[in-house]
Image (spheres, rainbow, N blue to C red):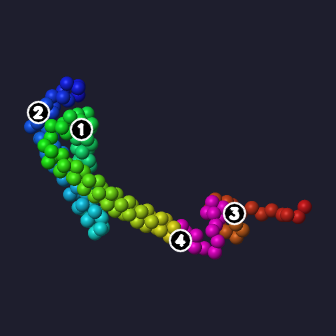
Amino acid sequence: MSKQMKEKQFSTEEKAQKFSQDLAGVMRSLTEIMEEENRLLGKKDLKGLEKLTQKKMQLVGACQKYRTMLIDNPDVLKKMDGLMRVQLGAMRKDCLLIAKKNESAVGGALQATQNMVETIVNAAVKETKKTDGYKDPRKKHLELGTYSPVCTPVAFSRAV
């Protein structure tokens, strides 16, 4: 977008107000989704989490878009209603707080999943090594007294 188009985009206070209301709606929706995600993580409801993930990603993309617009057009903040600026600041703080809680909950779920996978792998390794000693299956046919379809028995004399 050219600089002139960006300036025209928020040329009036009405457009700045519309922008701020849209941004507030996106932030509110994202906050609600993260709260719901935290609740579902607490319940260990993975199916519910799958449904939220797509919507959460769309809202995060929209927040990124609005953030870029604010960076490109800092004058829009001056054209906004003072009360709306205060509300957006409060919403930003709430969103950041919930994002931290969400990060912690998702990190905990990820760590629990990694621990479970590690336990399963360790149990599988332990199960395969249950014999008296571990024997390399590639060399088992070389042991004396073991039938091997790969090797044919050969008689030889060690006396020279």
| Residue 69, position as x, y percentages in the image | 23, 37
Looking at the image, which is closer to me, 114 or 146?
A: 114
Quadrant where the N terminus is found in the figure: top left
The residue labelled by disc 1 is 70
Which of the two discs, 1 and 4, labels the residue nearer the N terminus? 1
Identify the residue at horizontal 29%, vertical 68% (top origin). Answer: 42
Separation (CA) of disc 2 from disc 1: 15 Å
Looking at the image, which is closer to me, 152 or 51?
A: 51
Residue 61 versus residue 94 in the image, above or below: above
The residue labelled by disc 4 is 127
The residue labelled by disc 3 is 142
Separation (CA) of disc 4 from disc 2: 72 Å
Q: Mark 1 touching mark 3, by CB under 8 A?
A: no
Separation (CA) of disc 1 from disc 3: 73 Å
Q: How crowded is mark 2: few (under 14 residues within 10 Å), some or many (20 or more)?
A: few
**Could you tell me which secondary element the residue under label 2 belongs to?**
loop
The reply to whether residue 50 is visible in this rendering is no
**Could you tell me which secondary element the residue under label 1 belongs to?**
helix
Residue 80 versus residue 125 in the image, above or below: above
Q: Is residue 71 left or right of residue 134?
A: left
The residue labelled by disc 2 is 12
Quarter holding residue 104: bottom left
Identify the residue at horizontal 29%, vertical 57% (top origin). Answer: 97
| Residue 108, position as x, y percentages in the image | 38, 63
Identify the residue at horizontal 15%, vertical 37% (top origin). Answer: 79
Q: How crowded is mark 3: few (under 14 residues within 10 Å), some or many (20 or more)?
A: few
| Residue 30, position as x, y percentages in the image | 22, 53
**Could you tell me which secondary element the residue under label 4 belongs to?**
helix
Identify residue type, mark 2: Thr
Image: magenta residue range: 125-141
